[in-house]
């Protein structure tokens, strides 16, 4: 039981820092493609989680 908990803690500490930047890059790529398609169709598009200052 203790060994499995130790492996889970160490494994999760290693996977999250590696997977998070990759997931952020994939999300950026998907949102960019969606924005480009909408802009090509003449529709307005706002990126999610962006600040609307004006």
Image (cartoon, rainbow, N blue to C red):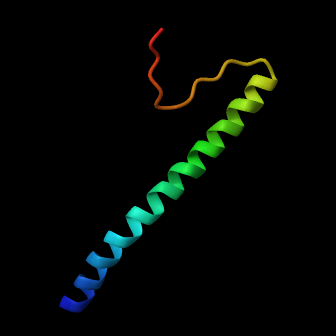
In the rendered image, the residue lying farthest to the top is 54
> Residue 27: image x %, image y %?
57, 46
Question: 13 above or below 31?
Answer: below
Number of numbered labels in the structure image = 0
Quadrant housing residue 37: top right
Quadrant housing residue 6: bottom left
Say whether residue 43 is left or right of residue 30: right
Q: Is residue 40 visible?
A: yes
In the rendered image, the residue lying farthest to the left is 2
Q: Residue at x 75, y 23 (%)?
A: 39
Say whether residue 25 is left or right of residue 14: right
> Residue 28: image x %, image y %?
58, 43
Q: Residue at x 58, y 24 (%)?
A: 46
Say whether residue 25 is left or right of residue 1: right
Say whether residue 53 is left or right of residue 28: left
> Residue 42: image x %, image y %?
78, 17
Question: 15 above or below 34?
Answer: below
* Quadrant of the rendering where the N terminus is positioned: bottom left
Question: 28 above or below 13?
Answer: above
Q: Is residue 1 visible?
A: no
> Residue 15: image x %, image y %?
41, 70
């Amino acid at each position: 039981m203790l060994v499995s908990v130790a492996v889970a803690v160490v494994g999760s500490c290693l996977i999250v820092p590696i997977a998070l930047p990759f997931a952020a890059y994939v999300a950026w790529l998907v949102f960019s493609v969606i924005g480009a398609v909408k802009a090509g169709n003449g529709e307005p598009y706002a990126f999610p989680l962006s600040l609307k200052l004006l």
